[in-house]
Image: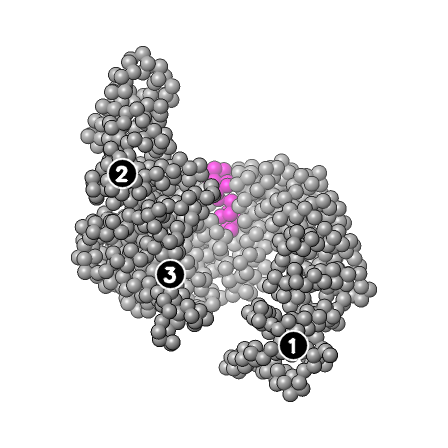
Amino acid sequence: MEWQPDPAGLQQILQLLKESQSPDTETQRAVQQKLESLNQYPDFNNYLIYVLTKLKTEDEPTRSLSGLILKNNVKAHYTNFPAQVTDFVKKECLANIGDPSPLIRATIGILITTIASKGELQNWPELLPHLCSLLDSNDYNTCEGAFGALQKVCEDSAELLDCDALNRPLNTMIPKFLQYFKHTSAKIRSHAIACVNQFIISRTQALMVHIDVFIENLFALANDEDPEVRKNVCRALVMLQEVRMDRLIPHMHNIVEYMLLRTQDGDETVALEACEFWLTLAEQPICKEVLSGYLDRVIPVLVNNTRYSEIDIILLKGDVEEDEQVPDREEDIRPRFHKAKTHTPSEEQDGQDSSDLDDDDALSDWNLRKCSAAALDVLANVFRDDLLPNLLPILKETLFHPDWEAKESGILVLGAIAEGCMNGMVQHLPDLVPFLIKSLSEKKALVRSITCWTLSRYAHWIVQQQHELYLKPLMTELLKRVLDTNKRVQEAACSAFATLEEEACTELVPYLGYILETLVYAFNKYQHKNLLILYDAIGTLADSVGNHLNKAEYINMLMPPLIAKWNSLRDEDKDLFPLLECLSSVATALQSGFLPYSEPVYQRCVNLVQQNLQQSMVGIQPSPDSKMASLSQPDQFEPPDKDFMIVALDLLSGLAEGLNEQIEPLVSSSNILSLLFQCMQDKMPEVRQSSFALLGDLTKACFQHVKPCIADYMPILGANLNPEFVLLPFAADFMPILGANLNPEFISVCNNATWAIGEISIQMGADMQPYVALVLNQLVDIINRPGTPKTLLENTAITIGRLGYVCPQEVAPMLQQFIRPWCTSLRNIRDNEEKDSAFRGICSMIHVNPGGVVQDFIFFCDAVASWVNPKEDLKEMFFRILQGFKTQVGEENWRRFSDQFPLPLKERLSTQYGV
């Protein structure tokens, strides 16, 4: 007998479903708990499918809600469903896929794909054949419901549909889908294209054998009256550019004409899909050849699409000019992610990327305006200055247009093309930059905000000119905008100023007082969201001007508001992330000037690390206290957010770097080194990355406290010298190299571990000897590995050189295995202490093993010539090696050898070293 509900139980569930639609959150929460508790009854899910499929007299929202609750139960508890419940749910889904209601059909389709994605495609063999057979039904609802379900299954289980385990059902499904491209119903046509589109990027063989028929059918639907069909046609053609351009090339003239038309489609969702075409085409080698004859038509369309629509302006509250008093909604503040510290030999930390077209984040993340501006950006990078003859006349018209919307779009376009067309724009910038600076005072806030962004795109050129001409007027006006009465303008101005800081660096020193006055004033003015951006601007300023910030007047302006904010935030508040990042930059810049503030900041960072480690341990060790979360109660254990630990470790690094030996009393009175031992073994790569950075900085600042721990630390450092894998559990023995693809997460871990080993070597001196064998082979492997990133190569070369400096007898025998990549890695970094110690090491190793350098001596010569101003004793070492080599081979052989040198190298060695 078929299952039947108990009438009283059915009424109870219907009542709960009605109550759950109440706007009152307390009622919703109570209902949620009751519904969750009903999962203990095996046939609860039978009731839910019954309401969805059989209670046709109930209102549709209630029936659909019942189906969505069932879908959530499938996601969470499907493996616990009794077999008879699973069978009943599946049977009801297939029997009712053609429900007269579009909402109910869609809900059943969602339920089917959720069951399928729980591994049920293999255990539900009749699903796909049954749905495909329903496509032939004369009943529209049945056909549409089946297609809707198939589309969802194709989206969620694309890879599974193309595997042997299911006997490759796509071999029959794709030809069947293609038949429905010409169906009389637009909805069916749209489903058919959407299903096939799922298999383009993966180059599924079942589609590739029908590729010509597919493209032919797409062309037949190009001018379909239904926007959803046109959108799916555009999406297909965009993806086909990436995987089967060979098949599109014969039709490119018609496709470009079509996409031009569709980029102007009255339906914005269609226009957006079509606009993606220009972005994708720009990445193809044939872009220039295909589009050269169309620029005069493509450019105006794209520029026109960058204008705000009326609905955009409403959504952006574009008519609201002053909103600085309006508190931010928490949901409008994007989550922050901290980027762990990486040591770079050339002392370049990654700056902000100012190229994002992020001027209207209140709209959806991606829209026609942004896509069109991005298309102009990439096309400018393809065509360079050839874009300008078509663009400049349009810009002249839009930039000086009486309508603010037109002017605003012109300023956006001017920023979008900055990178690609910079050479051609230079002649116009003496007129355009003053115009843009003046536009910072425009009446409309949306014009002021986009002008901030566009000016930041030309900051590199501006700082190279006389300050009086552009930099000073820009700074004056931009700082006024930092204090604008509109929050969007404040945000844009702060971001633009951070970019200007990065470009100008110490050029800003004469104006520091005025800059700090403005930024500090903004502390009391800004709402929550912009306060986080203000921290970035202050941190970037500190990075850019360095110890020029270490003046009593500047410290007295800057530190009180930062420390007040620091004291007001709880340890679990994520606003600590940007504030800690900011303080790390400030501490490094102020050096001894940060000393009065260092103790409470240091102690809180140590506490954050300790708390985080303790919270992690709660989840690892079973607790005798049943109230404590543990692995035996995984649902109750919420692991700590390790970003707090990472950002605290990075601020401790900043303190160590800034205070140097003055941090010693703080280290000696804390347990940071035992905490560091735990952090260095954390399974999260970013924690280890920041731990090794701090270890290196503490080694430089107060090695007397680090030295007793070296025997414990070195095996862990050695185990992290493989840039490809998380090495757990940690041990002195190393995992084999299993692949050639470097994982960026572990590259940074490896990079910082390598740098820390180099710093430890310098401090240990000859006492490093027992540890050389632990790390040397791994370092030589890294420096010889193809595709190793530049920063890691440089750090590895420096550390090998430093090991050779303190233990030449142990390292020199391997000289021939690394000398060539060592020289090429270090020839491009500027003179500094790290480079100095590394080259002293290579000279010592050549002295021990001169034969190791003979085959690659030209590379050594080139590396020596890269020095601009070596210290006298180092220069003497170079001289002795070069002269010794010349003497040994004889004058004639040396002449033949040096004739191979490029002329600049030959001249430099002759001038500097007389060879």
Marks 1 and 2 sit apart, C-alpha to C-alpha, by: 70 Å
Marks 3 and 2 sit apart, C-alpha to C-alpha, by: 33 Å
Residue 759 appears in the rendering: yes
- Sequence-first tag of 1 and 2: 1
Report the residue at 70% width, 61% height from top.
Answer: 125
Q: Secondary structure at mark 2?
A: helix
Front-lying residue, 706 or 233 = 706
Amino acid on which disc 2 is placed: Leu
Circle 2 residue: 803
Find residue 870 and report its horizontal and vertical position in percent. Answer: 24, 31
Give the prevailing secondary structure in the magenta stretch: helix
Find residue 169 and report its horizontal and vertical position in percent. Answer: 70, 54
Q: Which quadrant holds residue 66?
A: bottom right
Amino acid on which disc 1 is placed: Asn
Badge 2: few (under 14), some or many (20 or more) residues near its Cα, within 10 Å? many
Amino acid on which disc 3 is placed: Lys
Question: Does 537 sit left or right of 11 as displayed?
Answer: left
Q: Secondary structure at mark 3?
A: loop
Circle 3 residue: 642
Front-lying residue, 754 or 151 = 754
Q: Secondary structure at mark 1?
A: helix
Report the residue at 19% width, 30% height from top.
Answer: 873
Q: Against 786, is 595 above or below?
A: below
Circle 1 residue: 46
Write down the region rendered in magenta.
411-427
Find residue 690 and report its horizontal and vertical position in percent. Answer: 33, 53
Front-lying residue, 492 or 606 = 606
